[in-house]
Image (spheres, grey):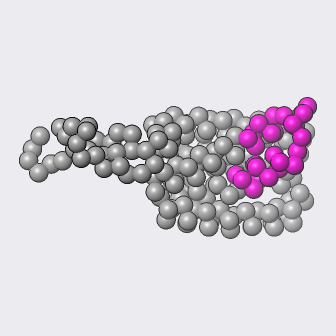
Amino acid sequence: MPPGRRIMLIHAGSTREQGEPVTGRTQTRGGGSLRMAFSGKGRDRTVLAILNTAFGILSAVVLLVLQGLPPLIWLAQGITAPIQWFTAAVLLAERKTLQNAAVLPLLFFGTLPMLSTGWNGLALIPQLSRLVMTVTALYILGESITGRRYREMAVGLTAGAIAVVLLALLLPWCCGG
C-alpha cells in the first residue's frame, strides 16, 4: 500500500485501519447491532421495492380493470399505488431525501387505514399491501437514523408532511373521493 494512503474497514459498526488488530484501537461509531440489521447491501431495499411495486400493480388492476373506475376516481380511491411506485423508485435509486419524503404518505395512506379496516375476506390483500407500506416506512426511518442522515431526514419528512396535507385536501375535492 502506498505511503499516506489509509484504508478504513467497517465491521459490525466499528472502524479500524487495515493491519490493525481487532483487539486494538477500535472506534465504535454507534448503533453497531442496529446497523447490522439494516445492512442487507441493497437486498432489503430491493425486496421492499418489488413488494411495493407488485401491490401497487395489483391495486391498479383491481380498481381500474376489474371494478372499472375512471382514472381520476382511481387516483382518489387507490392513491396508495402511486405512493408505492414512487417509494419503489426512490428505494432503488437510493435517494435518501426522497425516501424520507415518502415516509409520511406511506404512514398516512398505509398504516392509518390498516388500523381501521378488518383483516377478513376481500380486505386481506389490501391489508397486506398496507403492512408492506408500514414496514417500508419503518425501514426507511431506521436506515436514516442508523446512517445518521438527520438533515436528509428532516428535509424529506417536511416535504412528506406537505405532500400528505396537499393530497388529503385536494384528492377528495378534485377527484370525487
Residue 72 lies in the magenta-colored region: no
Q: Which residue ends up furthest to the left in the rendered image?
A: 3
Quarter of the rendering containing residue 155:
bottom right
Q: Residue at x 35, y 49 (%)?
A: 28
Observer able to see residue 72: no
Query: From which residue to which does the magenta span run?
Result: 106-131
Q: Is residue 19 visible?
A: yes
Q: Nearer the viewer, residue 7 or 88?
A: 7
**For residue 55, which quarter of the picture?**
top right
Viewer-nearest residue: 92 or 11: 11
Instruction: Label the magenta part by its dominant secondary structure.
Output: helix
Q: Is residue 78 left or right of residue 36?
A: right
Q: Please provide percent x and percent y for residue 39.
A: 47, 39
Vertical arrangement, residue 54 with respect to residue 81, above or below: above
Q: Position of residue 152 (x, y in %)?
A: 50, 62
Please name whichever residue, 6 or 33, is drawn nearer the observer in this view of the structure.
Answer: 33
Write the residue at 77% across / 53% down.
109
